Image: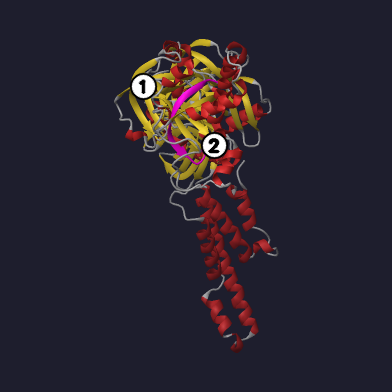
Amino acid sequence: MFPDHENPSNIAAAATAPSGTEASTPEAIAPAVTEQAAQQAESTDGAHATPAPALARQARDESRETTQTPAAREAHSEAPAVDAEAAAAAEEAAGSEEMSKLMQEFDERQEAAASHEVVEVKVVAYTEHGVVVDLGGKTEGLIPAAEFAETEIPRPDPNATIEVQRSGEVKDGYEIVSYQKVLRRRTWEKIDAAFKAKETIAGKVVDRIKGGVVVDIGVRAFLPGSQYDLKPTQNLDELVGMEVQVRVTKLNRRRGNVVVSRRALLEEELHAKRATLMETLSEGQIVHGHVKNVTDYGAFVDLGGIDGLLHLTDLSWGRVKHPSDLAKPEQELDVMILKFDKEKQRISLGLKQLTPDPWVGAAEKYPAGGKVQGKIVGIVDYGVFVELEQGIEGLVHVSEMSWNKKVQHPSKLVKVGDAVDVVVLDIKPSDRRVSLGMKQAQPDPWLLIAEKYPVGTVVTGKVRNIAEFGAFVEIEEGFDGLVHVGDVSWTGRVKNPHEVFKKGEPVTAKVLKIDPENRRVSLGIKQVNDIWGEWFKHHKVGQIVKGKVSRIATFGAFVELGENIEALCHNTEIEDRRRRDEGTGGYRPTTGPLKSAGPLEPGKEYDFKIIKISPETRRIGLSYRAAVKQLERKEIEQYRSASKSSSTATIGDALKSKLSAR
């Protein structure tokens, strides 16, 4: 039951061994005493005890000093001068004396060791002074009552067998023994064994101190606040009085310092659960868990030992402002495993995947051109987002919000929560995108205005903007028309529109063309007084007209047929080429002012034949020589009809009379 160094019979046997053996020599006994002293020091729990190494050094020093007496040292120093027999006798006497002293010292240390001996005893009786125990050999011991009064140690039951530690002190006929020291020693041994084996110890929280709590595990141990649970504990005061399971993480028996942890046990349990759980998880699996905490980008869900991230985008098919709108701490819910990285122990979860995807079949439900009603759920600078149903949102671009209003910002027209009618312009389920239009759900006022002002209508509006190629005239709000520089005047050519138009001034023009597809209107100012149109109504190709030559050009003569109506008679239509060559010697100057074009002179009237009319371009082509020939044929016919009445008249006479008339 007891260690060998605590059994007196073993030490005595070593001391009384035959002198012929090694154990009987002082050099052999000294180490035995040294070891005995060291073990004795350990049994004292460190209270008022000299450390074992110091006791060992002390025993060795004493051994060296006692083996050499002054007589022996003197005999050695005078050895060369004395008889050999005298020296041997002196050495034998010194050895005998040293042996006696050594044995006496050994007996004293053995008595000291026996005073701390732990023995099994039987409880005999209770007295007012304490508990009486039977030490054997008709000797009784007393456990002082103070050991039970000052501590929470219960008194042992009568006739119970217990362990006590002898003190060597005798009082009133009883040897004083300690029950508390043995219990304390056994407690430390138990804690030390649990520390080395990493075993769990039960304890009770007895006090709240700075940084943690005190746990009674037989001795007072420190449990840091961070080591109580896997997550920080807000109120440690509530733990006082609770029974807890802990593990010893630090132990210093000499200082009586013990640190324990409850979190270490929880982490082991968590790792075990996690390892088991990891073997059962797979992508696409639906699992049950509870929300641990919520962040701005999602929620962490505890699946029973391992956490998974439920991202904001996987909470709902619809718009989610913040994860806390759908997930609350400690909320239980079913989720689907989207991605599972077993090596990194990362799990991505989804909640919306448990419900049908609204985009499946969306193209059939919301075809392009269809009109539906939605709700404004978001406003940005470039448009608004309209929710058609939960999970399907479409964008109405700012350009598709109004027909006739120039929208500065979408918030000027609508606000979040408004119900609006929209038309599906385009839908792409694969990209989860749908383009919507608000204005398309309303009648197009532009088309109504176009019907109100058909081609040929004379309108009056204000100049809204001036460009290099003309001016934009606003007929009504949202309905503008362009007056091109070529449609300002029939005669004059406008080079700079700013010289003709001023912003804001009224303008009267005629609607020339309407382009509904491109939403464009062409206006003309010169067409308001369309003298050309009237002229074209009363004239046609082949007709003979009178005109005055207004000016001569190198390529022909310009002929004025009416007010602001001008036609061109090309050189090829003035006279025959043969006559032209004969008259000019085959040469016609191309530089300097021209005074005439053959027989045509500026300021004089002539007959011309219309050979070409272009109402679109307002161009008229004339022929002088064709008119002359036609007139000649007419005169000849007239002459022939007159010759029937005169038998002597000839064609030559007719030509002479015509020439004389000219």
Q: Amino acid at mark 2?
A: Asn
Residue 486 in the image, given as x and y percentages of width and height: 43, 30
Q: Secondary structure at mark 1?
A: strand
Give the residue displayed 47% in from the left and 55% down from the top: 50
Q: Residue furthest bottom?
A: 81
Residue 8 located within the stretch drawn in magenta:
no
Query: Circle 2: is it few (<14), some (14-19), or many (20+) Cα within 10 Å?
Result: many
C-alpha gap between disc 1 and disc 2: 46 Å
User: Quick check: 364 above or below 295?
Assistant: above
Residue 159 in the image, given as x and y percentages of width and height: 53, 26
Q: Secondary structure at mark 2?
A: helix
Residue 544 located within the stretch drawn in magenta:
yes
Q: Which residues are magenta?
A: 542-555
Q: Residue furthest right?
A: 20
Residue underneath mark 2: 571
Q: Choose top left, top right, bottom left or bottom right for residue 212.
A: top left
Residue 24 in the image, given as x and y percentages of width and height: 65, 62
Residue underneath mark 1: 474
Give the residue displayed 47% in from the left and 26% down from the top: 294
Taking the image as drawn, is residue 222 in sight?
Answer: no
- The one nearer the camera, 654 or 560, is 654
Mark before the other along the chain sequence, 1 or 2:
1
Q: Amino acid at mark 1?
A: Glu
Residue 528 in the image, given as x and y percentages of width and height: 38, 19
